[in-house]
């Protein structure tokens, strides 16, 4: 069953088989499609891309110029045993060299399976469990205090009745956040309670209530080698923000303080893999880390366009290659996201829905 | 007042601040002022140049220039 090739790039012209998740290129997109696009653009290797999808209408699985074959995988809530069983079935057919998971919610399972995957010849390039957990929204404030990083004050709540006291402490407006996704700005207790229930229903408990910081939103995509070195750091200013707070357009910027901030984060955590720092830059020039996402962002293709192809560098490191940190990138490189009606056939939909493969 | 070193400008009046990602458009006279700021020309030189070239009341122009420079400062284009 196991792939016996130690370094697939040294094999006789064989394509590297890379499985990628998060093909949901929707209005609040997963990074999968952008990761694949960046990898495919790298001239240093040939790849076969296996899409791993949760739902049959994830657009990426119908993009056959990007994804060679797709398999459905079980939801993260099914646990590691179920995921392992499914991955081994796929591996028997596809001989996967590398898996790049891109959803926050699935990372725990993949990190847990990392050593077992390695035993059967599947590489990953993921943070350690303690690295992964240290930047969790629930622990971020403490993490910031420990490493002298500026993080907004917050309170972790398990009961809606604690909202009033927390609001009195933090003041309005405040931000009500889910443990995985979603954030609502609340100006009154009533709005905060409504947001609490809504987010609880969707993502469960706890709920994070955070101090509201006003400023300019900057996002930083970074890639760590696991030894404390940042291989690449690209800061991006959001130019157009959707109602879900996602960047619909953005531009690479030149500010050494953001690069230093990301390097510091990678250094103190010894981060392995891709990550995204969400920064709020206040009018008085203070940079708050609002969140740290433990995977590539959906705009990751901009790093390739700006001259630092982070997904391709991750592939190389995951396969054992030493990658020299990037130094330069193009400033003023803009991405503008767009929507496109991809046309497919009921037979395709039926195939993925019925057999779990496409 | 000096233009920040990293500010990119074009002859068409486009100004890009690579530190913030902000970009602006300015009219012909604004472009000329930016160009003089880039060359580190003194305030009085800018006033003299524009008032000689264009039919404009000097007092009015001085008010407008102060307003323009204050906008550039707000947008962190000036040092």
Image: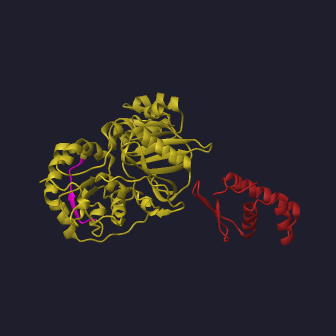
- Mark count: 0
Residue in front for this viewpoint, A292 or A185: A292
Q: Classify residue A90 by image quadrant.
A: bottom left
Q: Is residue A255 visible?
A: yes
Q: Is residue A56 visible?
A: no
Tell me: A257 left or right of A18: right
Tell me if residue A200 is in the magenta stretch.
no
Q: Colour of chain B?
A: red
Residues in magenta? Answer: A67-75
Tell me if residue A71 is in the magenta stretch.
yes
Q: Position of residue B17 (x, y in %)?
A: 61, 58
Tell me: A124 left or right of A26: left
Q: Residue at x 32, y 39 (%)?
A: A204
Residue in front for this viewpoint, A89 or B56: A89
Q: Position of residue A278 (x, y in %)?
A: 47, 47
Residue A213 vs A252, above or below: the answer is above
Tell me: A187 left or right of A96: right
């Amino acid at each position: 069953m196991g792939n016996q090739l130690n370094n697939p790039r040294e094999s006789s012209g064989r394509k590297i088989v890379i499985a990628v998740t998060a093909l949901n290129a929707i209005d609040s997109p997963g990074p999968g499609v952008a990761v694949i696009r960046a990898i495919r653009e790298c001239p240093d290797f040939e790849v076969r891309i296996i899409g791993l999808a949760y739902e049959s209408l994830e657009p990426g699985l119908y993009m056959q110029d990007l994804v060679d074959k797709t398999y459905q995988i079980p939801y993260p809530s099914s646990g590691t045993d179920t995921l392992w069983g499914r991955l081994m079935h796929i591996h028997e057919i596809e001989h996967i060299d590398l898996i790049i998971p891109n959803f926050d919610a699935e990372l725990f399972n993949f990190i847990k399976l990392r050593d077992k995957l390695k035993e059967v010849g599947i590489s990953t390039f993921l943070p350690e469990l303690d690295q992964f957990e240290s930047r969790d929204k629930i622990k971020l404030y403490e993490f910031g205090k420990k490493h002298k990083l500026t993080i907004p004050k917050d309170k972790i709540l398990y009961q809606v009745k604690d909202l009033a006291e927390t609001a009195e402490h933090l003041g309005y407006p405040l931000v009500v956040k889910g443990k995985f996704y979603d954030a609502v700005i609340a100006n009154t207790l009533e709005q905060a309670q409504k947001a609490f229930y809504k987010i609880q229903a969707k993502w469960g408990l706890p709920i994070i209530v955070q101090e509201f910081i006003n400023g300019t939103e900057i996002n930083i995509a970074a890639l760590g080698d696991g030894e404390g070195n940042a291989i690449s750091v690209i800061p991006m200013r959001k130019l157009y923000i959707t109602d879900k707070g996602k960047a619909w357009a953005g531009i690479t910027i030149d500010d050494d303080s953001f690069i230093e901030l990301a390097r510091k984060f990678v250094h103190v955590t010894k981060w392995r893999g891709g990550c995204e720092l969400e920064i709020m830059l206040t009018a008085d020039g203070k940079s708050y880390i609002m969140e740290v996402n433990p995977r590539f962002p959906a705009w990751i293709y901009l790093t390739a366009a700006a001259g630092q192809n982070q997904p391709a560098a991750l592939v190389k490191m995951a396969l054992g290659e030493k990658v020299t940190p990037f130094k330069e990138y193009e400033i003023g490189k803009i991405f503008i996201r767009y929507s496109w009606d991809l046309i497919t056939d009921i037979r395709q939909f039926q195939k993925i829905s019925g057999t779990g493969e496409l | 007042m000096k233009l920040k070193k990293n500010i990119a400008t074009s002859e068409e009046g486009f100004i890009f601040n690579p530190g913030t990602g902000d970009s602006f458009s300015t009219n012909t006279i604004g472009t000329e002022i930016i160009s003089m700021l880039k060359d580190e020309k003194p305030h009085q030189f800018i006033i003299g140049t524009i008032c000689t070239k264009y039919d404009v009341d000097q007092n009015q122009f001085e008010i407008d220039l102060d307003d323009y420079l204050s906008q550039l400062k707000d947008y962190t284009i000036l040092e």
